[in-house]
Amino acid sequence: MNDFTKYLAGRVTAGGMNRREFMGRAMAAGLTLTAASQLFTESAEAQQPKKGGHLKLGLEGAAATDSRDPAKALSQFMFVVSRCWGDMIVEAEPLTGKPVPALAENWEPSPDAVTWTFKIRSGVKFHNGKTLTVDDIVATLRRHTDEKAESGALGVMKSIKDIKADGDNLVLTLTEGNADLPLLLTDYHLVVQPNGGVDDPNAMIGTGPYKVASFEPGVRATFEKNADDWRSDRGFVDSVELIAMNDATARIAALSSGQVHYINRVDPKTVALLKRAPTVEILSTSGRGHYVFIMHCNTAPFDNNDLRLALKYAMDRENMVKTILGGYGKVGNDFPINSTYALFPEGIEQRAYDPDKASFHYKKSGHSGSVLLRTSEVAFPGAVDAAVLYQQSAKKAGINVEVKREPGDGYWTNVWNVQPFSTSYWGGRPTQDQMYSTAYLSTADWNDTRFQRPDFDKLLLEARSELDETKRKDMYRTMAMMVRDEGGLILPMFNDFVNAASKKVKGYVHDIGNDMSNGYVATRVWLDA
């Protein structure tokens, strides 16, 4: 049984998939009718998830500046918060990344993929008792198209020309065809709110499995079970508590002592220590996440491509993966796409550590003096050590990298996307188009390298509407080369998501989409007391 059929079996056990749906997907995955039938029966008879209990998670990423508005969610902490109380129109399947129904039951594109019709689920209630309507979804999407909303999904939404209701259907008309649209709507900022959140974007009222009981920015968030949840395959515990723990040592101590059931952002260097605890389980998931060093291409001295190339060749990627990730990851190549994506651009030469080439480009750039790199432990696990390691490898090329350690609180508002050279992370996106649209399109709010090229933007839009996969793959390869050779991204490593949990935690789903079971950790697991 492969990982995908294991996942399907788990969905049956959790009560989230009927026989017809299971049989169709299992046979499509290669099982025979007899094998699929037997697996369904065994899964259906397996122990059902236990209900009840109080789930406590110690999470890195919270800050006093955290916004309750899902459009402005920046950190891992708020990522999980939004998943607890909110729902999307479409979700992504954990092991394949394919779009699956959520608040939309199904969808149908026009032949040119310009117009999409989504059948919206009926009978779903918001936490305030209001019944979900198509108008709520229309208002939600429209709010995220408004630049004043400062939505992290703005880059995605700019491709939608018209948003309207047609009876029980949502109809979206795009500026050009896009076969990936359902996956783009899985963007975690697009939480559906009453009247789109226009009246009060900070109300934290949604249709998710838990209702918000309290929220203290930078401290904690608590939730209680939503008795009117429209789904039966999630929200198994009675209450959830997310506790801000930005200090890695504090998180490990809290899990080891039983104060919390789950922690995120486990530094690979501490895995061996955690494994000694008989009550703890390491949860490592491969995916699209990547740890990065980002330069603003429009800010001196990083507006010089020779300097950018020098800093890229000065990165010892193999050593970074070995030392910082402890082997829990893979080497990156300075563009944000790996082989988990459809139409991955194969055959691009791997950039290797080369002090001579780094020195050549550094001298050619004409730059002199140090280069200031800002970092913090909240940027990614081991970010400060990674910055120091980079400083050492760059020194061998005659480049002086000055490392400045910034405080964790406020890093995501004062340093990331503000200062011209810093460390950061990306959890990846469901499609190449969305990854590029979110962070590399010239007009994207989260273009944290200030990579602004009209020819790249044009190619991105052309690839989006290209239905010939061979041509589209070639376009993505050209785009990858642009970012790799002329952008401000230094991507030394694609990280595995390394988290840890008490062995009392059951039902954890390894999701390639993003960290912490794609943010759904609190909604998918249960406690075996």
Image: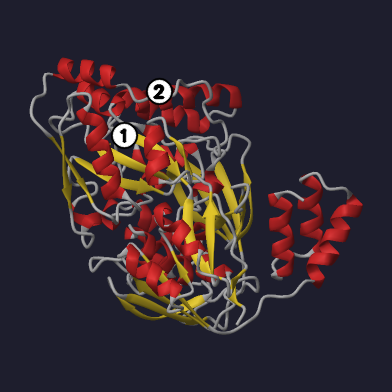
The residue at 87%/58% (across/down) is 37
Examine the rendering and report whether any part of residue 519 can be seen: no
Q: Secondary structure at mark 1?
A: strand
Instruction: Read off the residue under disc 1.
Output: 489
Instruction: Report whether 69 appears left or right of 516.
Output: left
Residue drawn 47% across the image and 63% down it: 274
Q: Which sits in the foreground, 188 or 387?
A: 387
- Label 2, residues with CA under 10 Å away: few <14, some 14-19, many ≥20: some
Q: Residue furthest left?
A: 369
| 39 relative to 1, above or below | below
Specify the label residue 481 is tagged with: 2
Say whether residue 343 is left or right of residue 148. Answer: right
Assign a secondary structure to mark 2: helix
**Which kind of residue does numbered mark 2 sit on?**
Met
Foreground of the two, 446 or 61? 61
Crowd rating for badge 1 (residues with CA inside 10 Å; few <14, some 14–19, many 20+): many
> Which mark sits nearer the N-terminus, 1 or 2?
2
Mark 1 touching mark 2, by CB under 8 A? Answer: no
Q: Nearer the viewer, residue 430 or 197?
A: 430
x 57%, y 81%: residue: 228
Residue type beneath disc 1: Leu
Distance from disc 1 to disc 2, alpha carbons, whole Å, reads 12 Å
Could you say which quadrant of the image residue 291 lies in? top left
Residue 411 x %, y %: 22, 56
- Is residue 422 depicted above or below 309 in this figure? below
Where, quadrant-wise, is the C terminus in this rendering?
bottom right
Who is closer to the viewer here, 494 or 302? Answer: 494
Give residue 440's position: percent from left, percent from top: 34, 36
Is 168 placed above or below 295 here?
A: below
Quarter residue 290 falls in: top left
